[in-house]
Image: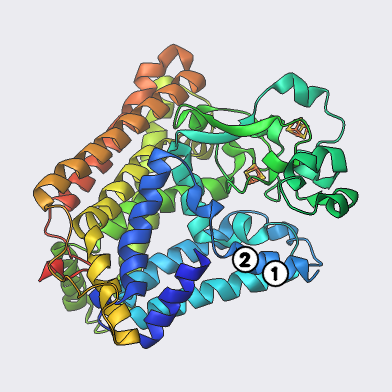
Amino acid sequence: MFALSLIMIAHAFWGPQLAPKNLAALLTWVHFRGLVVLVILLAGNLFCMACPFMLPREIARRMHLPKWDWPKRFRNKWPAIMLFVMVLFAYELFDLFADPWWTGGLIVGYFAVALFVDSFFRRASFCKYVCPVGQFNFLSATMAPLEISVRDRPTCDHCQTKDCIRGGFASATASADRVSKTRDTTDRLALPVYQRGCELALFLPRKVGNLDCTFCMDCVYACPHDNVGLFARLPAEELTVTGTRSGLGNLDQRFDLTALIIVFAFGALLNAFAMISPVYALEQWISDQSGLQIEWPILMSLFAVGLVLEPAILLFGAAASFRAVTRSTGSLLSIVNRFTRSLIPLGFGVWLAHYGFHFFTGFLTVIPVAQNAALRSSGSAWLGTPQWQLGGMPESIVFPMEIGFMSLGLLGSWLVSWAISTQVSPQRAMLGFVPWGILHLTMFIAAVWIMNQPMDMRGTFLGG
Ligand code: SF4
Ligand code: SF4
């Protein structure tokens, strides 16, 4: 992944500046995004596991640079939410999908921020508190069929060392199976082997699901009892779990997580809405009405409506209806906190439909672009002459897949909100489910309408 990042950065700055012919723009906006969601759907958060931004942290750590703990007041999701919104905003304002140079700048900036944060702060501060891609992957991975968890709980009850969270120096015997694979075992066996524990502060016996888990496998290697592994589970079930979770606390009291989920779910609609023709007509209308001739305030007003006003009206409206029909005495905010996580399956379905559309209709375009890059950089067609006619699957096949992804998302959201409704109001669960079911259906219909519009074929030649 790191080598691929270097190739993308080089091509961004020194390759052709036409996005569909540039590896940085094409791989970032078509292939990377599509593969992230598809791999999470089929397996888990494997992109965090292989993240090239981990490398700066490893270098900084080996140089013993990090000295501080992440400041307590920022140990929440607000920094990452701000960056998440800024990336979505910059993507639209600067048309990043069409700009290889700025896409390269974004990748370099990402490395720089990761290096900066992890050079000063201990543990995985960048992943847990800063990285917007990580937060996207954490929420999406609640839909994944795999998770890291303990094999046998009673073993943890009797465990003295808790190395899975504390890390530690493995004894030569415990590490023998690992080091004996190397040639010179004698000297190595004499050395203590340091293994990190979970740097995301997830204590395995009390870890729930995939939230905040980067799939780094440190805990798997650290556990002296070989009691941690990668296991199959029921996707989305973790969204219905109540109580305190290791590393996250009680989700019902985490409004920052609620805000992150709102940006994730409503951002999916907004991001897809921004690439269809009606958005241009709407922007023109706002410009005519307000007299504004520059884009950023118009775009900002669309973001304010899409990410703040609309979610506030819909979520507090559904919470007020829930409270009225179930005669619940909880505050509106506590009900919103409790039910907002039911938006994740539908939000993930919309991201899947959107990113899947670009990926499936254009996944073969990387071949001629790589061939062209090899030809231009070396002067010989050692990858073959560019086959510019290659594209992907026809839209007539991809569209039903999009509807399928979103329908599964709707079903998941309904099941999660039903489960939460039975927990909060067992006597009137069906009545309590109705407002949330209607909210999900409304978002689903909006998403289907958006996907049904003619779309920008961003980053590929297919748009003509
Ligand atoms: S996962 Fe391993 S190291 Fe952690 S408490 Fe359980 S047995 Fe101990
Ligand atoms: S150490 Fe284990 S629990 Fe912690 S982030 Fe890595 S894989 Fe997940």
Q: Is mark 2 within 8 Å of ligand 2?
A: no
Q: Which residue: 25% across, 35% down?
A: 407
Drawn side of residue 75 relative to residue 242, left or right = right
Drawn side of residue 317 relative to residue 404, left or right = right
Q: Are marks 1 and 2 in contact (CB under 8 Å)?
A: yes
Work out which residue is located at the far front of the displayed protein and give it: 183
Check disc 2 and give the amino acid type: Leu
Which of the two residues, 388 or 449, is positioned nearer the viewer here? 388
Q: Which residue is mark 1?
A: 59
Check disc 1 and give the amino acid type: Ile
**Position in image of residue 79 (x %, y %):** 58, 62
Label count reads 2
Which of the two residues, 111 or 252, is positioned nearer the viewer here? 111
Q: Which residue: 20% across, 42% down?
A: 401
* CA–CA distance in space, label 1 to label 2: 6 Å
**Position in image of residue 81 (x %, y %):** 51, 59
Residue 10 in which image quadrant: bottom left
Which disc, if any, is residue 422? none
Q: Is residue 431 placed above or below 45 in the rendered structure?
A: above
Q: Residues within 10 Å of mark 2 (few under 14, many from 20)?
A: some
Element type where label 2 sits in the image: helix
Q: Quadrant of ligand 1?
A: top right
Q: Is residue 315 placed above or below 239 in the rendered structure?
A: below
**Position in image of residue 341 (x %, y %):** 46, 38
Q: Which residue: 75% across, 50% down?
A: 196
Q: Which residue is mark 2?
A: 55
Image quadrant in which the C terminus is located: bottom left
